[in-house]
Image (spheres, rainbow, N blue to C red):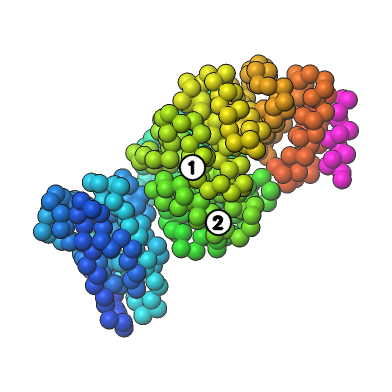
Amino acid sequence: MIRAFCTSASMVMASMLFLAVIPAFAHEIKTVIVEISEDGFVPSTIDLLQGDRIVFRNTGKRNHWPASDIHPTHGIYPEFDSLGGIAPGESWTFQFEKAGDWGLHDHIDAEFTGTVHVEESPEFNQPLVKEKSRMVTVPVAIVRGMKVQLAKFFYAVIPIVADRRLASLDLFSITDDTDELSYWLHIFGSTKLMEHLLESAGNGAELDCHQPAHIIGRVSYELLGMEAFTGGSPACHSGYYHGAMEGLLKVRGVSKLPETVSEACSLFDTDFSKFSCLHGVGHGVLAYRNYDVPAALKLCKELSTGYDQTSCYGGVFMENIVQGQGLGAESDHKTEWVNQTDPHFPCNKIDPDLAVQIQCYQMQTSWMLTLAKYDIETVIRQCQEARKDMVPVCFRSLGRDIAGFTLRNPRKIIENCDKVPALHYVGCMTGALNVIVDFWGSGLEGQASELCALLPSEHKRDCYALISSRLLDIQSIPGKRKPVCDTFEQKYHSLCTETLAS
């Protein structure tokens, strides 16, 4: 029965594909010749109208392979891919049916890059389906869809089995397999998967769940579009929303970045969740720009407000470092914006603007620690050697990293922050405390208060005051703020309630 249904459906869809609309053009189609050789693309910047073509002609001495960014997956415009090297003297032609700014590179020599700007043409009718390969995928998609629907029905009828199956999922492994992750996202949804990820990480005390959360967010966007931003969870340092934003930019591109960002980030109801969305933009634009940090920062500067811009800068610098560590959005790509011998690079070689420098040094100790093999004393010395006005920022960054690599363990945070110069002790603690608050987001309970309770008495008030002020950022439901106040030591309880009442 199922097989007969699938066969009939396949025949219907194949007929529809055969009769697919052929694109019509009212403007004269332009063809541009782009030479590609061992010197790169010439020209490297091309302006087209929708429907225009580029002929990539190999004038070099070895094969070259033009394709869409991002290297090596070519996922931004997957149809734009020669699917193999073009031999010397040969050419490959591609018609650009999608409007937007499309980065390109040579898959064989990835340092050769360029940009194709395709202006929207109302006279161009894009075909419903063009690729012959889609005819093969239709029946496969039908079978997969039926499998998902049957599984959802089964688990809905027997919820205890669903709970057991969810509990058995190893999301740290499943996030390495996009097809399997997509299946379970269809079955359980992003919110339940994120809850399970957090539990599997021992609520963040045993394993770092930020990168798997990134992947869940990115794949959720691929499946659900903008709806992905209404699910998930801010836990795991908002990795889910960072990943969803990466997915959004991968599809939408950056030609209308302020509008795209406004549409996505307006879906969030707290200052912190909006910040997480904007921070995710930084992750996404750096991946989109093939890990060209100056180019990504330039895109951030297109955003509407200074706050939006600086939030984006922070995401750029974080993505750059995690990519340098081999944990970025595009795991097979390399960034040239980390240095194996200079712990202050790229901060000391980029835009000296104060806002950019603050965001750079606010992440830089992650790379310093990588180079120093997590020797705190070495990084303390390096922070003291930073640009004078960036020294306090560097120590806040160190506190952020200390909270990260200790998995937010209060006693270990204090043990490590005790090593920094007295002048920067508060900065170290501030960086660490913010990480605890950020990790839990709207799910914060008493985790941050545990750190304050262990501090010397002269620092407790400032610690509890910071939590109190952050409650307004992270929690939109007033009734969920007071329980956090109730985790404070009695002496400081009123500090929290008064802050919330003001």
Q: Decide if residue 236 is on the left or right side of residue 175.
A: right
Eyeballing the image, is 204 above or below 303? above
Give the percent coordinates (x, y) of residue 267: 62, 55
Q: CA distance from mark 1 to mark 2?
A: 18 Å
Give the percent coordinates (x, y) of residue 489: 83, 24
Q: Decide if residue 432 is on the left or right side of residue 469.
A: left
Mark 1 neighbour class, 10 Å CA radius: few under 14, some 14 to 19, many 20 or more: few
Please say whether residue 184 is visible from this viewpoint.
no
Give the percent coordinates (x, y) of residue 152: 46, 44
Q: Which one is in front, 32 or 174?
A: 32
What residue do we see at 76% from left, 35% from top?
A: 466
Residue ID for mark 2: 301
Q: Quadrant of the C terminus?
A: top right
Tag 1: residue type?
Lys
Mark sitting earlier along the chain (1/2): 2
**Residues at discs 1 and 2 in contact (Cβ within 8 Å):** no
Magenta part mainly helix, strand or loop?
Answer: helix
Give the secondary structure at mark 1.
Answer: helix
Give the secondary structure at mark 2.
Answer: loop
Tally of numbered tags? 2
Q: Which one is in front, 220 or 157?
A: 220
Looking at the image, is mark 1 or mark 2 nearer the viewer?
Answer: 1
Seen as rendered, the residue at the extreme bottom is 26
* Residues in magenta, as a range: 490-502
What residue do we see at 52% from left, 30% from top?
A: 366
Residue ID for mark 1: 349
Please say whether residue 351 is visible from this viewpoint.
yes
What residue do we see at 68% from left, 39% from top?
A: 442
Tag 2: residue type?
Lys
Q: Is 414 colored magenta in this rendering?
A: no
